[in-house]
Image (cartoon, rainbow, N blue to C red):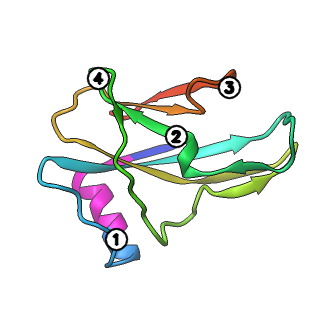
């Protein structure tokens, strides 16, 4: 993970790129995380890198499972990738404001599972 934006700063970035992106709920906030991903080895090419491969998990261990979509956020993380390919881009989460230790999991429940702190 290269950068992390939360709260009002994340919402300002989201709102500026598309005024029709959904505003967070009263007790929620966006988290924007910019990742650098490099594919060293992949079983089936292309590897479809996308937002659905990331889960936000609360400090209580519950998955945030509300479907959210943020459009026009650049650079976007989504890409079809082959061995040796690299990509930098943002993915996004909607979490509770009072969650003190939320985490993000990439490819949760797989051999490639990786966890990141969202605060």
Measured in 3D between alpha carbons, the distance from the residue under mark 4 to the one under mark 2, in whole angstroms, is: 16 Å
Q: Are marks 3 and 2 in contact (CB under 8 Å)?
A: no
**Residue 38 in the image: x percent, y percent?**
75, 41
Determine which residue is flagged by label 2.
54
Is residue 85 a member of the stretch shown in magenta? no
Q: Residue at x 55, y 28 (%)?
A: 108
Determine which residue is flagged by label 4.
59
Q: Nearer the viewer, residue 17 or 106?
A: 106
The answer to whether residue 99 is above or below residue 53 is above
> Which region of the structure is painted magenta?
5-14
Which of the 4 image quadrants contains residue 58?
top left
Measured in 3D between alpha carbons, the distance from the residue under mark 2 to the one under mark 1, in whole angstroms, is: 19 Å
Q: Are marks 3 and 4 in contact (CB under 8 Å)?
A: no
Under circle 1, the secondary element is loop
Quadrant that contains the N terminus: top right
Determine which residue is flagged by label 1.
21
Is residue 10 a member of the stretch shown in magenta? yes
Q: Earlier in the sequence, mark 1 or mark 4?
A: 1
**Residue 80 in the image: x percent, y percent?**
76, 56
Q: Residue at x 36, y 66 (%)?
A: 14
Left or right relative to 75: residue 79:
right
Mark 4 burial class by Cα count in 10 Å: few <14, some 14-19, many 20+: few
């Amino acid at each position: 993970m290269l950068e992390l934006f939360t709260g009002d700063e994340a919402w300002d970035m989201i709102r500026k790129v598309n005024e029709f992106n959904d505003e967070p709920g009263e007790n929620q906030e966006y988290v924007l995380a910019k990742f650098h991903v490099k594919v060293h080895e992949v079983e089936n090419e292309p590897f479809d890198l996308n937002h659905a491969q990331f889960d936000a998990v609360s400090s209580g261990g519950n998955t945030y499972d509300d479907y959210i979509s943020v459009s026009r956020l650049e650079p976007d993380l989504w890409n079809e990738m082959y061995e040796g390919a690299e990509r930098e881009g943002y993915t996004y989460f909607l979490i509770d404001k009072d969650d003190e230790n939320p985490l993000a999991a990439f490819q949760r429940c797989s051999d490639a599972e990786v966890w990141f702190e969202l605060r």
